[in-house]
Image (spheres, grey):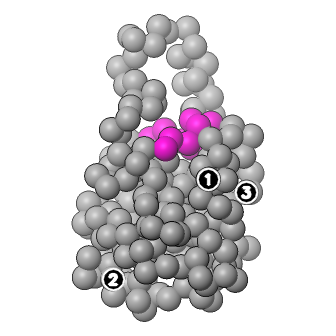
Amino acid sequence: MERARPLVDRRRLLKGAALAAVPYALLPDARAGAEPQAVDFPAAEWQPATTYNYTVADRPTAHPVDHVIIHVTQETYAQTLAIFQNPQKKVSAHYLVRSADGHVAQCVREADIAWHAGNWDNNTRSIGIEHEGWVDRPAYFTDALYERSARLTAAICATYAIPKDRAHIIGHYEVPGTDHTDPGPNWDWARYIRLVNFA
Ligand SMILES: [Zn+2]
């Protein structure tokens, strides 16, 4: 989770202002309208973040996607979805994995830039995955959460030719300049990377 104030995205503001005068049906790209099957990962459920909480882009065309950032929410699954849907929060991630059963929600399309790393350069080049739980409550890191998340990360790595290693699958705490500690010392990195490689 990242609550830091994002950079003001002037391009998005300008685009939003320009679009206000255009009938919706005439827009060339109406996918912001929450199509039910808009997921990039087939097993995911589409639970869109508000468009105020991410930057529309056309990755990997304009920005290469070269790493995955692992987060822990410090909130419940339901509360995290509510935060992503709240325009005041200015935060989002591409995916959210539920603790109890590993259910995956997709909240931002992979082509778009989610606001999760607290660092614009990392945001532009990464896919962010939130995991329901708390850094000091290891019971939230269930077998189902590890396994389903690893399948998701493996699929992302395959799509963008990202090596399945710790140099390219990093924790939020490893993002330059961050003061966040997630996923924390209870996250089993060796197990996770092994699962990603054998998913
Ligand atoms: Zn985080």
**Residue projecting furthest to the front:** 100
Q: Secondary structure at mark 2?
A: helix
Q: Residues within 10 Å of mark 1 (few under 14, many from 20)?
A: few
Q: Earlier in the sequence, mark 3 or mark 2?
A: 3
Badge 1 amino acid: Ala
Marks counted in the figure total: 3
Kindly identify the residue that appears in the image at 25 percent across and 66 percent down: 158
Q: Is 54 within the magenta? A: yes
Q: How much space separates mark 3 and mark 1, taking CA atoms?
A: 17 Å
Badge 3 amino acid: Arg
Left or right: where does residue 161 sit relative to residue 134? left
User: Image quadrant for the N terminus?
Assistant: bottom right
Q: Residues within 10 Å of mark 2 (few under 14, many from 20)?
A: some
In the image, the segment drawn in magenta is: 47-57
In the picture of the structure, the residue carrying the numbered disc 1 is 78
Q: Nearer the viewer, residue 74 or 27?
A: 74
Q: How much space separates mark 3 and mark 2, taking CA atoms?
A: 30 Å
The answer to whether 1 is drawn above or below residue 19 in the figure is: below
Residue 131 is situated, as x and y percent measured from the top left of the image, at 54, 67
Left or right: where does residue 186 sit relative to residue 168? right
Foreground mark, 1 or 2?
Answer: 1
Is the residue at mark 1 in contact range of ligand 1, meaning its CB lies under 8 Å from it?
Answer: no
Badge 2 amino acid: Leu
* Tag 3 near tag 1, CB within 8 Å: no
Q: Secondary structure at mark 3?
A: loop
Q: Secondary structure at mark 1?
A: helix
Residue 31 is situated, as x and y percent measured from the top left of the image, at 39, 30
Kindly identify the residue that appears in the image at 62 percent across and 71 percent down: 133
Residue 99 is situated, as x and y percent measured from the top left of the image, at 53, 69
Foreground mark, 3 or 1?
Answer: 1
In the picture of the structure, the residue carrying the numbered disc 2 is 195
